[in-house]
Image (cartoon, rainbow, N blue to C red):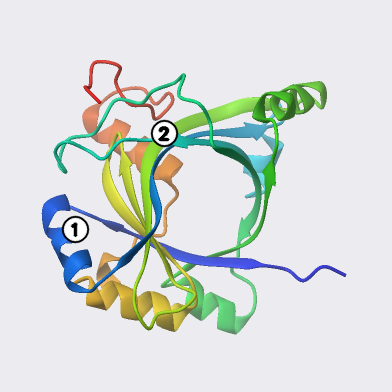
């Protein structure tokens, strides 16, 4: 029987990207995945059955991306950039079960996750459509992945999104807390919402109807 893998993570808002990059250099952070453009699509049944039960199926394509010219300026997404890999991900409901998980769940986002690399994202889309699944939400971001010395198993992702820049830290709870503290954050700064939820909140603040979280084609690369 396959062991259940639980994803434990937090997000952190990055108000000053240049300062964050300087801090990463001071900490001797190692870039383990160069900057890539992620194009993500969430799929669901026509009646939204997966989302209703807190489940998620995501198809992600990654393509090479240039270094940003200015850290504070989001780059234009290149829709036709050649993908370097595609990933299929399933995530279960956010866990709020036993007492231990409930306590951790107040500070960290915990959910079952299974991910596999696939050879052909287009064929997978065709399979989803044949099964009756439909695109629910699309979102883009530029991601650069880092690790910190003496924090094995902790992954730090710098995500440039259309609604701002965020850090996503994944690993064991103690490692996440240590990494966040080294980067200048406190527990009160932890964000447990998904990018979809953050996008909807941003749309409400701006008084616009939510759609897909995509970069503006007017932005320069």
Whether residue 74 is situated above or below residue 216 in the rendered picture: below
| Quarter placement of the N terminus | bottom right
Q: Residue at x 25, y 72 (%)?
A: 28
Q: Position of residue 152 (x, y in %)?
A: 46, 78
Label 1 neighbour load within 10 Å: few <14, some 14-19, many 20+: some
SS label for mark 2: strand
Instruction: Provide the residue designation for mark 1.
Output: 21
Report how far apart the C-alphas of labels 1 and 2 lie in the structure: 21 Å
| Quarter placement of the C terminus | top left
SS label for mark 1: helix
- Residue 77 lies in quadrant: top left
Q: Residue at x 39, y 26 (%)?
A: 210
Whether residue 141 is situated above or below residue 156 in the rendered picture: above
Nearest the eye: 32 or 19? 32
Instruction: Provide the residue designation for mark 2.
Output: 140
Q: Badges 1 and 2: C-beta atoms under 8 Å apart? A: no
């Amino acid at each position: 029987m396959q062991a259940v893998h639980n994803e434990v993570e937090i997000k952190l808002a990055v108000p000053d990207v240049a300062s964050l990059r300087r801090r990463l250099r001071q900490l001797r952070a190692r870039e383990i995945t160069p900057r890539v453009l992620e194009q993500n699509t969430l799929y669901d049944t026509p009646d939204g059955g997966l989302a209703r039960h807190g489940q998620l199926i995501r198809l992600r394509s990654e393509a090479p991306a240039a270094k940003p010219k200015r850290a504070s300026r989001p780059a234009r997404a290149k829709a036709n950039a050649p993908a370097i890999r595609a990933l299929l991900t399933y995530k279960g409901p956010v866990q709020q079960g036993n007492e231990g998980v409930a306590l951790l769940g107040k500070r960290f986002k915990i959910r079952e996750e299974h991910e596999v690399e696939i050879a052909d994202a287009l064929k997978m889309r065709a399979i989803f459509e044949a099964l009756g699944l439909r695109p629910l939400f699309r979102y883009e971001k530029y991601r650069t992945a880092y690790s910190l010395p003496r924090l094995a198993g902790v992954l730090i992702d710098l995500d440039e999104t259309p609604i701002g820049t965020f850090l996503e830290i994944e690993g064991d709870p103690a490692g996440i807390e240590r990494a966040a503290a080294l980067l200048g954050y406190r527990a009160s700064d932890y964000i447990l919402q998904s990018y979809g939820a953050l996008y909807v909140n941003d749309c409400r603040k701006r008084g616009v109807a939510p759609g897909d979280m995509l970069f503006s084609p007017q932005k320069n690369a």
